[in-house]
């Protein structure tokens, strides 16, 4: 939250230093905000729907059944389509661990949750282009799977 105060302070300093440049920068920021608003609104709607469809209890029940590697894949897929901030995701990871979910599954879930942006894809595609956004998401998913496997090896949940 402190960064809002710092940003506000720096905006005031900028305004006193050069009023015209500050006004021009604020106008550019406003235009970009208007440009991104439709995509951002769609993303917020999808986030709300996904958080409704995947509450904490459902996530635990899905990740605690079946074959271990299937659960890793399921965790990666659920993490890819679920959007939540880190300050919610990491306490959820603690709850998952307390519920008996393995580190490997938690790693797949939280890593894809933070790195893969299925729901945020429209916003990314607007700024980076569809090809780059898709490539970034695919590479992030692959890295997330590799990270979960390495964590599984480290904690002895899978053996080579």
Image: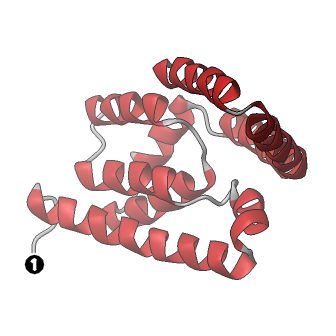
In the picture provided, is 93 more to the left or to the right than 138?
left
Looking at the picture, tell me which residue is in the foreground, 138 or 104: 138
Q: Position of residue 60 (x, y in %)?
A: 45, 38
Q: What residue is at 43 percent from the left and 51 percent from the top?
A: 109
Looking at the picture, tell me which residue is in the foreground, 108 or 30: 30
Looking at the picture, tell me which residue is in the foreground, 18 or 87: 18
In the picture provided, is 67 more to the left or to the right than 26?
left
Q: Position of residue 126 (x, y in %)?
A: 79, 65
Q: Can residue 108 be seen here?
A: yes
Q: What residue is at 88 percent from the left and 52 percent from the top?
A: 35
- Asked if 96 appears above or below 133 in the picture, the reply is above
Q: What residue is at 36 percent from the left and 62 percent from the top?
A: 67
Q: Position of residue 121 (x, y in %)?
A: 71, 62
Quarter of the rendering containing residue 132: bottom right
In the picture provided, is 119 more to the left or to the right than 20?
left
Dot 1 surroundings within 10 Å: few (below 14), some, or many (20 or more)?
few
Looking at the picture, tell me which residue is in the foreground, 60 or 7: 7
- Asked if 59 appears above or below 13 in the picture, the reply is below
Residue that extends furthest to the front in the rendered view of this protein: 17
Q: Which residue is mark 1?
A: 160
- Asked if 95 appears above or below 154 in the picture, the reply is above
Q: What residue is at 55 percent from the left and 53 percent from the top?
A: 78
Q: Position of residue 119 (x, y in %)?
A: 70, 54
How many numbered marks are there?
1
The quarter of the image holding the C terminus is: bottom left
Q: Can residue 65 be seen here?
A: no
Secondary structure beneath dot 1 equals loop
The colour scheme used to paint the residues is secondary structure
């Amino acid at each position: 939250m402190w960064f809002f105060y710092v940003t506000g302070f720096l905006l005031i300093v900028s305004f006193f230093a050069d009023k015209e440049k500050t006004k021009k920068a604020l106008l550019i920021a406003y235009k970009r905000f208007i440009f991104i608003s439709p995509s951002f609104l769609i993303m917020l709607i999808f986030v709300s729907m996904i958080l409704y469809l995947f509450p904490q209890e459902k996530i635990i029940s899905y990740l605690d059944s079946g074959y271990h590697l299937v659960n890793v894949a399921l965790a990666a897929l659920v993490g890819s389509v679920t959007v939540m901030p880190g300050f919610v995701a990491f306490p959820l990871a603690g709850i998952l661990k307390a519920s008996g979910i393995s580190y490997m599954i938690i790693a797949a879930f939280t890593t894809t949750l933070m790195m893969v942006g299925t729901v945020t894809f429209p916003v990314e595609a607007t700024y980076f282009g569809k090809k780059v956004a898709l490539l970034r998401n695919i590479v992030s998913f692959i890295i997330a799977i590799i990270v979960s496997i390495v964590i599984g090896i480290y904690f002895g949940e899978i053996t080579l």
